[in-house]
Amino acid sequence: MEGSTVEFVLLGLLHQGPRSGYDLRRILASSPLRHFSSSPGAIYPALGRLAGRKWVAVGPPGGSRRRQEFRLTARGRQSFLEWLRRPVTRDDVVIRPGDLLLRCAFMDGALPSAAIRRFLNNYAAGHGAYLEDLRRYEAEHADKMSTLGRLVFQHGVASYAGSVQWAKRALEVLDGSSETTEQRSGKRRGR
Amino acid sequence: MEGSTVEFVLLGLLHQGPRSGYDLRRILASSPLRHFSSSPGAIYPALGRLAGRKWVAVGPPGGSRRRQEFRLTARGRQSFLEWLRRPVTRDDVVIRPGDLLLRCAFMDGALPSAAIRRFLNNYAAGHGAYLEDLRRYEAEHADKMSTLGRLVFQHGVASYAGSVQWAKRALEVLDGSSETTEQRSGKRRGR
DNA sequence: GGATACATGTAAGATGTTACATGATTGT
DNA sequence: ACAATCATGTAACATCTTACATGTATCC
């Protein structure tokens, strides 16, 4: 599967509109969500790779300064959407949970709401399954852990439980906001 | 600051007792907490670097098979303890929160409980400070975010809030367990 | 004696970090 | 003119992934 996470983040930002490398770096540096490098040594080579794959193209130098605006090509958009639609794997859940949230944040306006709901359901299911694994592990090994080890483990458990709850809540919110346009009565929602 | 996270994880495991590279790989592969590579191409080079710095030494081939046991040297132990005692920086909180929990899990039996409490206090303070930043950001920019963007952002907020609560709870547990050895009366504790 | 698990390693390639280099434009 | 900011890049280094290579002990 071609493409690193940073590359898809860049595609995602370019999906919202054309920008220069400098713009992209500033967005990455100032966004409080996820902390991608934003160092020139990471971004410019990444943009170069995207250009090499024809996923982005350079536009005319916009503005007065020496700046090149990048825009998404059809292939780039295609690859970006495929990234968003990738299944939620166990590896994603266990070792790259942040990437899943990143993908989710980029789905707005890019995927139909049915696909987004499917994603959130898979997200909740994947995290729920791993949560059960953790609890099973805890039941078996809690006695062998040190006090702090157990506390840290419980942090992990609480964190995954929170993610499951979050996904369920997110589904409610999405259902709610789509419902309000179609129907106002029936189906009370919590909170 | 010399040393990568995996290297300190290896030191931490060797701090508990001598092990072979294969042992270390299996522990990393089976531990549900944090997902270090455990691939030979990551572990053996890391052990080589540690040996080059004289932080670990190879013992005699223990057991019948061709296996070399590594053990911590005095310098290795020193470096490991310095890693545990590093201050909780904003960068740790924002971009490497997992490393902080990792360090915490390794503190048991390695640092005095006063140092552990100090760490947990700094952990709570650092996460609390960042949490305030996130909430400030939310108050200013929530209107510009998409529905999903806002939801993902709220996941981050809830996650940091949970970490603050966790650290406070952990401090209570530690205080509780040390109290039980010294005093049984007075000071009721929650849960 | 052959399959399987044990045990250690290397090579190629991708990526990220840090630090440095370069030049244009703007403000004063 | 000069400093600060804008804007793009490169080079060296460290590290991790993936895939391959190699050999040993144990079990049947």
Image (cartoon, coloured by chain):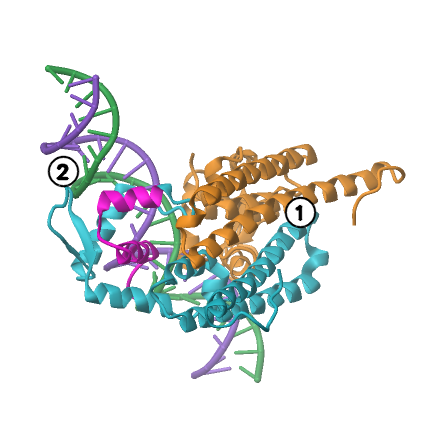
Chain colours: A cyan, B orange, C purple, D green
Q: Is residue A50 left or right of residue A108?
A: left
- Residue A123: x and y in percent read 49, 67
Q: Is residue C11 left or right of residue B71?
A: left
At 53% from the left edge and 48% from the top edge, which residue is drawn? B157
Asked if the stretch drawn in magenta spans residue A9, the answer is yes
- Residue B156: x and y in percent read 50, 50
User: In which quadrant of the rendered view does residue C12 lie?
Assistant: bottom left
Outermost residue, right direction?
B185
Residue type pointed to by label 1: Leu
| Picture layout, residue B43 above or below residue B181 | below
Residue with the mark numbered 1? A148
Chain letter behind tag 1: A
Badge 1 or badge 2: first in the primary sequence: 2
Stretch of the chain drawn in magenta: A1-29
At 56% from the left edge and 43% from the top edge, which residue is drawn? B103
Chain letter behind tag 2: A
**Foreground residue among C9 and D3:** D3
Residue A44 appears in the figure: yes
Label 1 environment density (alpha carbons within 10 Å; few <14, some 14–19, many ≥20) = many
Residue with the mark numbered 2? A65
Same chain assignment for discs 1 and 2: yes
* Secondary structure, magenta segment, majority class: helix
> SS of the residue at dot 2?
loop
> SS of the residue at dot 1?
helix
**Foreground residue among D20 and A116:** A116
Label 2 environment density (alpha carbons within 10 Å; few <14, some 14–19, many ≥20) = few
Residue type pointed to by label 2: Arg
User: Which image quarter holds the N terminus of chain A?
Assistant: bottom left
- Residue A82: x and y in percent read 32, 69
User: Which image quarter holds the C terminus of chain A?
Assistant: bottom right
